[in-house]
Image (cartoon, rainbow, N blue to C red):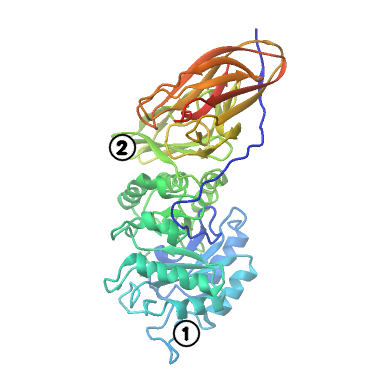
């Protein structure tokens, strides 16, 4: 008998436990910042000036970059004079910025864009000309930036006098907060000191550099990706790992390599700060930077950084969980000859469907697969897909069911959907799935779960309030990242059915991942 099952999206009431550490939570950068910064193209050269910055803002509007999400037009080092004024204020270089920064900010704002500035958490910035840094001047400089209408601060690490990094960066965080102006806070500490910035970055800034400076070549770029891709657990909305600004368009890599650069930054939910002079770049550069499918992966509202699923001697598979349950997958070839890279829907955590749609985010072609995901990838190239279930969808994620006494978590990789339900460790917490059957009949239920202990965590299974399995065993899987399943057969009535599993011991239930109905 065939029974069509429809997932009923039931409103859930979930208790969120308090975070363990106080977060920055300034409400900004809920998705990774997108914009421009001049450093990778100009360094400190004279062409970094008012005309350039205005020209970039104009191009953001005229060439549709604003429309696809680019927002921040950021100034890097060398914007200031080498000495403060008699009141101790920073002074814009009158040759580069003859009308000052406030007028420039007004211009950028008039285009519906935002503006960022730069200084260092040291006595001087990084450039050898010796521009003043903000160490010991934090509040005065923050106030000045706010008075100019600044929306974003990149805070560098040079000439820091050996003062503790947490102390220096926290001081500026609080100074920015005191201004009352919303200012995105970009920590540029390079992942250098202990404790590592990614452990305190989420409490302190909206993004933090995880590496030293990028250069416009393959070796540098892929090195930044390798360092950054192991840090996925630290990223979340409002708090992002930053493997440095984009080099796309600067000329030192091939178009294939620049597509890899952009693909990897997107799957790692990295900031997308354009680092080329858009007044001079070719059309290929705009095609890469304006790929809205790839941008959507970067900007996905769930805010999960993708992770490496497998790495076979430089043939690397990355996967990123997306808010609608899809997965982004990048098949990335770090080697110097063409190779086939393969994975599968279940390996990237999206099993449970008889077929899938793969959309190639660069060629824009779509195809269907029963689960295999494979492509021939050129040297230094990356094939990127958005993978969605398109078959008989008979899986309902536990996180979409009704949850009594439990929280949705995603800290143990390997789950399907966007997470799993960690029920309270007690007798009585339950998860209840609502399913509609077109006719009465027998179905097989498969519960996906993980039980990181070695002890059984039994549940009572009821269908429409009737106990159908007493103490159904959910045996230990040895680790919270080891997922397994329990299968049983039940009879459904035509129409709505409530399938509930209730913890029966003080240890609570296993982490519940999904229910498949076949
Ligand atoms: C450091 C930073 C770079 C850039 C320069 C400017 O090297 O890491 O991103 O801001 O300083 O001097």
Could you say which disc has been placed on residue 94 in the image?
1
- Mark 2 sits on what residue? 314
Report the residue at 56% width, 59% height from top.
Answer: 27
Q: Quadrant of residue 260?
A: top left
**Along the horizontal axis of the image, is 112 left or right of 262?**
right
Give the residue furthest to the top.
1
Residue 481 appears anywhere in the view? yes
Q: Earlier in the sequence, mark 2 or mark 1?
A: 1
- The answer to whether 328 appears left or right of 156 in the picture is right
Q: Secondary structure at mark 2?
A: loop
Closer to the camera in the image, 170 or 261:
170
Residue 295, how many percent across, how many down? 53, 48
Q: Residues within 10 Å of mark 2 (few under 14, many from 20)?
A: few
Residue 465 horizontal side relative to residue 102, left or right: right
Q: Foreground: 108 or 433?
A: 433
Taking depth in this image into account, of 148 and 384 the one nearest to the observer is 148
Which quarter of the rendered picture does the C terminus lie within?
Answer: top right
Q: Does residue 208 lie above or below 410 as drawn?
A: below
Q: Is residue 473 above or below residue 246?
A: above
SS at mark 1 in the image: loop
Measuring from the top left, give residue 405's x and y in whole percent.
56, 36
> Is residue 180 or residue 425 the one in the foreground?
425
User: Mark 2 and mark 1: span between their CA atoms?
Assistant: 49 Å
């Amino acid at each position: 008998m065939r029974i069509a099952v429809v997932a009923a999206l039931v409103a859930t009431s979930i208790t969120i436990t308090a975070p363990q550490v106080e977060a920055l939570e300034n409400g900004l950068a809920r998705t990774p910042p997108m914009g421009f910064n001049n450093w990778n193209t100009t360094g400190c050269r004279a062409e970094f000036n008012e005309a350039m910055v205005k020209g970039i803002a104009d191009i953001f509007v005229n060439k549709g970059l604003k429309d696809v999400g680019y927002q921040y037009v950021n100034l890097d080092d060398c914007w200031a004079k080498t000495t403060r004024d008699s009141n101790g204020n920073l002074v814009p270089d009158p040759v580069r910025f003859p009308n000052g920064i406030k007028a420039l900010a007004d211009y950028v704002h008039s285009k519906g864009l935002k503006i960022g500035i730069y200084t260092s958490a040291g006595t001087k910035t990084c450039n050898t000309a010796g521009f003043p840094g903000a160490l010991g001047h934090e509040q005065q400089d923050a106030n000045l930036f706010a008075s100019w209408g600044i929306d974003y601060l990149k805070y560098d690490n040079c000439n820091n006098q050996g003062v503790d990094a947490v102390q220096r960066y926290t001081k500026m965080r609080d100074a920015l907060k005191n201004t009352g102006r919303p200012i995105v806070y970009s920590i540029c500490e390079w992942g250098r000191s202990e404790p590592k910035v990614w452990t305190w970055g989420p409490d302190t800034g909206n993004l933090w550099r995880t590496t030293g400076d990028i250069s416009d070549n393959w070796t540098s770029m892929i090195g930044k990706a390798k360092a950054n891709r192991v840090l996925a657990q630290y990223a979340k909305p409002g708090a992002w790992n930053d493997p440095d600004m984009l080099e796309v368009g600067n000329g030192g890599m091939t178009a294939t390599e620049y597509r890899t650069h952009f693909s990897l930054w997107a799957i790692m939910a990295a900031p997308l700060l354009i680092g080329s002079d858009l007044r001079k770049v070719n059309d290929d550069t705009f095609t890469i930077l304006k790929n809205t499918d790839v941008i959507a992966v970067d900007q996905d509202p769930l805010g999960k950084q993708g992770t490496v699923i497998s790495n076979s001697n430089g043939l690397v598979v990355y996967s990123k969980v997306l808010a609608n349950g899809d997965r982004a997958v990048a098949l990335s070839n770090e080697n110097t000859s063409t190779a086939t890279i393969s994975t599968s829907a279940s390996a990237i955590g999206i099993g449970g469907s008889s077929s899938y749609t793969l959309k190639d985010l660069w060629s824009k072609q779509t195809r269907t697969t029963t689960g295999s995901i494979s492509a021939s990838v050129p040297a230094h190239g990356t094939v990127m897909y958005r993978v969605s279930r398109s078959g008989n969808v008979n899986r309902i994620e536990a996180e979409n069911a009704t949850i009594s006494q439990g929280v949705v978590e995603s800290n143990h990789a390997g789950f399907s959907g966007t997470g799993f339900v960690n029920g309270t460790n007690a007798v009585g917490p339950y998860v209840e799935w609502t399913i509609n059957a077109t006719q009465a009949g027998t179905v097989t239920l498969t519960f996906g779960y993980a039980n990181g202990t070695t002890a059984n965590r039994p549940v009572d299974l009821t269908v429409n309030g009737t106990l159908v399995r007493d103490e159904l065993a959910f045996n230990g899987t040895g680790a919270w990242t080891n997922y397994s399943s329990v299968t049983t057969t039940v009879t459904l009535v035509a129409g709505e059915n409530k399938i509930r599993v209730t913890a029966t011991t003080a240890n609570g239930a296993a982490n519940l991942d999904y229910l498949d109905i076949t």
